[in-house]
Image (cartoon, rainbow, N blue to C red):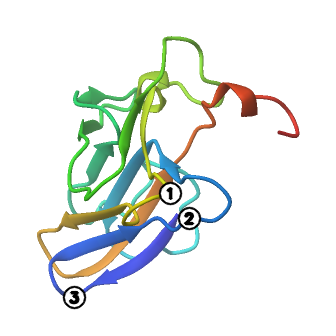
Amino acid sequence: ITSTTVNDGTLSIEFVHGVENPKISAIEIHQGKSTGTVTSPSQGSGAGPSININCGSNLSFQDSKGELWIPDKYFNTGLAEPLAAGDISGTQDDQLFRSGRYDVILGAPLIYRIPVSNNGDYIVSLLFAETYRPAMQVGA
């Protein structure tokens, strides 16, 4: 969770290659400024509607708190990754983490350019889940 300021009507998020291909499950954006007390998704400032993106999915999703997540859009590249059914620990909203978008090493970096209705401060939450089977173990 981080705060950022938008001055041109577009909130940009760029994923940079480190060790492996970056993969994102969901993006949550609330207008407002972080007070240092926001510790988990769906706890934004409430100063405007949220933008919730279900990355890698072509379906809308309503989570356990009633928040609507729109299908994946606003990205420039990358591949959608579906995941078979099954429990994903640490969430009540498994469906949100059953897809993702990941960046491939060759080519331009994955960038989301999300239009926002107002310039100003935004709280951005990036949601991740380790769904790559070989890495789904302690210490991997």
Determine whether 91 is above or below 111 in the image.
above
How many numbered dots are placed on residues in this image?
3
Look at label 1 and name its amino acid.
Ile
Instruction: Name the residue beneath numbered marker 3.
Output: 7
Give the residue at x 40% y 65%. 109
In the picture provided, is 77 more to the left or to the right than 15? left
Instruction: Name the residue beneath numbered marker 1.
Output: 105
Look at label 2 and name its amino acid.
His
Residue at the extreme front: 106
Task: For the C terminus, give its image quadrant.
Answer: top right
Q: Position of residue 99 (x, y in %)?
A: 42, 31
**Quarter holding residue 80:** top left
Instruction: Name the residue beneath numbered marker 2.
Output: 17
Determine whether 114 is above or below 28 in the image.
below
Disc 3 versus disc 2: distance between alpha carbons? 26 Å
Look at label 3 and name its amino acid.
Asn
